[in-house]
Image (cartoon, helix red, strand yellow):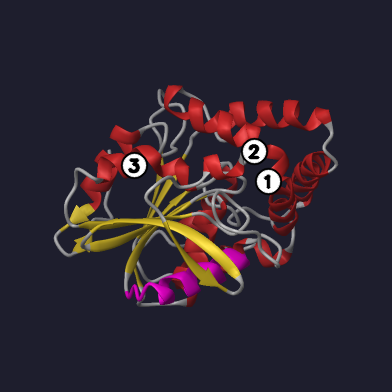
């Protein structure tokens, strides 16, 4: 079932560090690289992909992380650090010099890490509810351990897991646009349990904390946040966002919108991307 959450035809593969990474590559112009969340897949961007086919000047590239979708399993644990490594190797393999990185959750964390560690190679970052920006306190460690424990139930093929995971996904992935992909993610839960466990364990480790990187990111950053996200809450990440305030914008969603996921709000998201375009650069003022 995992392949159904990943990118759909047409797609290609590239070999990176012993892994076959699946990706779609459409359009021409400014490269935009789409990076999905843990236990999800490139199909998260399906509606966005359709919208961008109507837009000129962009080369839209969507990948499935290792161990996700149509990509092969990894020999290393699934962490934001590993995702950054794969992203770096992926961009080199495709000879992409300067890209816009659009990442959700761990995808956002990987995009921010890459932008920090590779100054001058990223034109802009759009980080949707990125991990790694909240303090790793006892509450965060407890929650990450709890979620890793839930993933452990999936590894043991416990029938309890699917019910818990389904409730978790319904709490986050709401609205009619999310329904089909949400069900695919739930159905693939057992297959994705290992990467879920690895990711949650990584975010309670000091290496998962990217707050100190924020002031050093040189490119413009748009932070897009689901106002009611109780998993990666905006409140806990505000200090890190403010440390990058001179170049970045912390944006809360409108309260009547369910969730800032590409598959849920394709028209709204496309409008945001269009507002950000400003000649050869990026607009970093208020997006209303």
Query: Residue 100 at x, y = what percent?
Result: 34, 61
Kindly report the secondary structure that dominates the magenta region of the rendered protein.
Answer: helix
- Give the image quarter of residue 28: bottom left
Residue 88 part of the magenta segment: yes
N-term-proximal mark, 3 vs 1: 3
The Cα–Cα distance between marks 3 and 1, rounded to whole angstroms, is 24 Å
At x 33% / y 35%, what residue is drawn?
A: 266
The residue range painted magenta reads 81-97
- Residue position marked by numbered label 1 in the rendering: 192
The Cα–Cα distance between marks 1 and 2, rounded to whole angstroms, is 6 Å
At x 55% / y 64%, what residue is drawn?
A: 20
The Cα–Cα distance between marks 2 and 3, rounded to whole angstroms, is 22 Å
Q: Is residue 197 above or below residue 190?
A: below
- Viewer-proximal residue, 57 or 9? 9
Q: Is residue 123 above or below residue 266?
A: below
- Residue position marked by numbered label 2 in the rendering: 188
Q: Is residue 171 left or right of residue 98?
A: right
Q: Which mark is residue 48?
A: 3
Which secondary structure, mark 1?
helix
Q: Are marks 1 and 2 in contact (CB under 8 Å)?
A: yes
Which secondary structure, mark 3?
helix
Query: Residue 224 at x, y = what percent?
Result: 42, 45
At x 28% / y 33%, what residue is drawn?
A: 267
Residue 107 part of the magenta segment: no
Indicate which label's residue lies in the foreground, 2 or 3.
2
Q: Are marks 2 and 3 in contact (CB under 8 Å)?
A: no
- Viewer-proximal residue, 40 or 116? 40
Which quadrant, please, contains the N terminus? top right
């Amino acid at each position: 079932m995992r392949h159904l959450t990943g990118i759909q035809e047409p797609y290609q593969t590239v070999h990176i560090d012993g892994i076959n990474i699946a990706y779609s590559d459409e359009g021409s112009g400014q490269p935009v690289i789409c990076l999905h969340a843990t236990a999800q897949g490139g199909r998260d961007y399906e509606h966005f992909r359709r919208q961008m086919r109507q837009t000129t000047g962009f080369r839209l590239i969507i990948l499935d992380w290792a161990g996700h979708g149509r990509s092969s399993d990894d020999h290393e644990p699934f962490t934001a650090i590993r995702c950054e490594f794969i992203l770096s190797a992926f961009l080199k393999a495709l000879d992409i010099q300067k890209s816009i990185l659009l990442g959700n959750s761990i995808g956002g964390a990987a995009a921010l890490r890459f932008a920090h560690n590779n100054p001058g190679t990223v034109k802009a970052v759009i980080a949707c509810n990125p991990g790694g920006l909240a303090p790793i306190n006892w509450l965060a460690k407890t929650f990450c351990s709890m979620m890793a424990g839930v993933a452990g139930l999936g590894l043991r093929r416990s029938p309890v897991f699917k019910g818990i995971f389904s409730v978790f996904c319904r709490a986050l992935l709401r609205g009619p646009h999310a329904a089909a992909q949400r069900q695919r993610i739930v159905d693939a839960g057992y297959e994705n349990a290992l990467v879920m466990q690895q990711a949650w364990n990584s975010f309670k480790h000091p290496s998962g904390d990217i707050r100190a990187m924020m002031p050093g990111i040189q490119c413009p950053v748009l932070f897009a946040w689901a106002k009611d996200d109780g998993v990666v809450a905006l409140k806990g990440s505000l200090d890190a966002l403010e440390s990058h305030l001179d170049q970045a914008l912390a944006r809360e969603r409108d309260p009547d919108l369910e969730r800032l996921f590409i598959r849920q709000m394709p028209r709204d998201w496309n409008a945001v991307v269009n507002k950000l375009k400003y000649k050869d650069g990026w607009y970093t003022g208020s997006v209303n």
